[in-house]
Image (cartoon, rainbow, N blue to C red):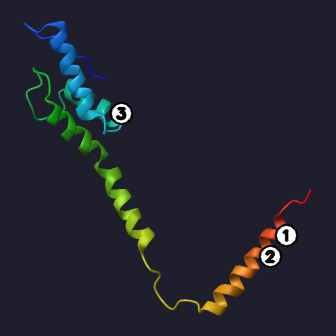
Amino acid sequence: MLVLPVQGGTTEEEAGARLDLYAEILADKPAWAVAQACDRWAGGKVSANVRFMPSTGELCRLADEATAPHRAMIERLKRVLIARPAGSQPNPAERERVARKFGDLLKSMTILD
């Protein structure tokens, strides 16, 4: 993770307050995404002036970029979970028959003392 030196004219208290602000703003981001954002900044792999500390907004944006593929996958999975199956659905009697068969199967697999 990126460790930034105290800038000239900044007291330890001011540096601590700044660090607290970063921690508060980035608290809802995954730690791996924040670490990746810091690494990208420190490595100069961003289109910004990396001679200065990034703002909390810049680090949030970089962390959000890192998590974007994961958030997109979550949204796709949510759509799958609420999707209705295509085609005809079994009638209630068929559902009951299948449920009974699964119940029988479960009982046959249960170890009795």
Whichever of callouts 2 and 3 sits on the residue coming sooner in the sequence is 3
Q: Disc 2, disc 3: CB below 8 Å?
A: no
- Viewer-proximal residue, 36 or 13? 13
Q: Which mark is residue 104?
A: 2
Marks 3 and 1, how far apart in space?
46 Å
Q: Residue at x 82, y 65 (%)?
A: 109
Location of residue 25 (image quadrant): top left
Q: Disc 3, disc 1: CB below 8 Å?
A: no
Marks 2 and 3, how far apart in space?
47 Å
Q: Is residue 43 visible?
A: no
Q: Residue at x 30, y 34 (%)?
A: 27
Residue 68: image location, x then y, percent: 28, 50
Please, what secondary structure does the residue beneath circle 3 have? helix
Residue 105: image location, x then y, percent: 79, 73
Please, what secondary structure does the residue beneath circle 1 have? helix
Left or right position of 35 against 90 = left
Where is 103 relative to 6, above or below?
Answer: below
Q: Which residue is label 1 attached to?
A: 108
Q: What is the three-letter code of the residue carrying label 1?
A: Ser
Q: Which mark is residue 31?
A: 3
Left or right position of 94 against 24 = right
Q: What is the three-letter code of the residue carrying label 3?
A: Ala
Please, what secondary structure does the residue beneath circle 2 have? helix
- Viewer-proximal residue, 33 or 57? 57
Residue 41: image location, x then y, percent: 20, 28
Q: What is the three-letter code of the residue carrying label 2?
A: Asp
Q: Residue at x 74, y 81 (%)?
A: 100
